[in-house]
């Protein structure tokens, strides 16, 4: 199970590079790899708690902190892609308005 954790961590960088492409569903591999890393991490923690059986269960805060650390990468990439797409849309509308204004001015209409 440990080798699976490290193999999944090695897959995060290629999934990140794929997510930066301009395809619509390009962030799905990054979400899947990050979710898999999170599940494997939780399984390892549960297995360790069962093995040592020290009687203490990890607090919910620790589980949430682990999930947040792992899922922060795909969330940040998704937000960046959304902002970039919105920037292109706004820039495209502004560019069309500027071209229309220049076309009207050159035609003598105001």
Image: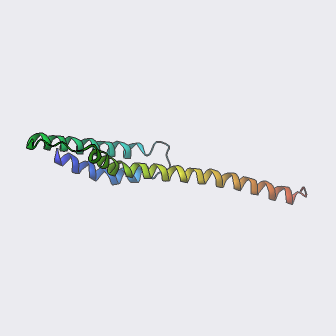
Name the spot of residue 64 as percent of width and height, x first: 31, 45
The residue sitting at 21% across, 44% down in the picture is 58
- Above or below, 26 relative to 102: above
Name the spot of residue 76 as percent of width and height, x first: 43, 52
The residue sitting at 26% across, 41% down in the picture is 39
Q: Quadrant of the N terminus?
A: top left
The residue sitting at 8% across, 44% down in the picture is 52
Name the spot of residue 61 as percent of width and height, x first: 29, 46
Left or right, 29 with reference to 24: left
Name the spot of residue 95 as percent of width and height, x first: 70, 56
Q: Quadrant of the C terminus?
A: bottom right
- Above or below, 6 relative to 50: below
Left or right, 76 with reference to 54: right
Asked which colour scheme the image uses, the reply is: rainbow
Left or right, 3 with reference to 87: left
The residue sitting at 43% across, 46% down in the picture is 27
Image quarter of residue 109: bottom right
Towards the viewer: 106 or 69: 69
């Amino acid at each position: 199970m440990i080798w699976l954790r490290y193999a999944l961590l090695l897959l995060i960088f290629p999934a990140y590079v794929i997510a930066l492409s301009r395809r619509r569903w390009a962030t799905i591999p990054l979400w899947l790899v990050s979710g898999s890393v999170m599940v494997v991490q939780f399984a390892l923690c549960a297995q360790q708690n069962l093995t040592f059986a020290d009687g203490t269960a990890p607090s919910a805060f620790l589980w949430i902190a682990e999930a947040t650390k792992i899922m922060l990468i795909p969330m940040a990439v998704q937000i960046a892609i959304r902002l970039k797409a919105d920037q292109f849309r706004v820039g495209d509308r502004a560019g069309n308005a500027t071209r229309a204004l220049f076309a009207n001015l050159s035609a003598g209409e105001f």
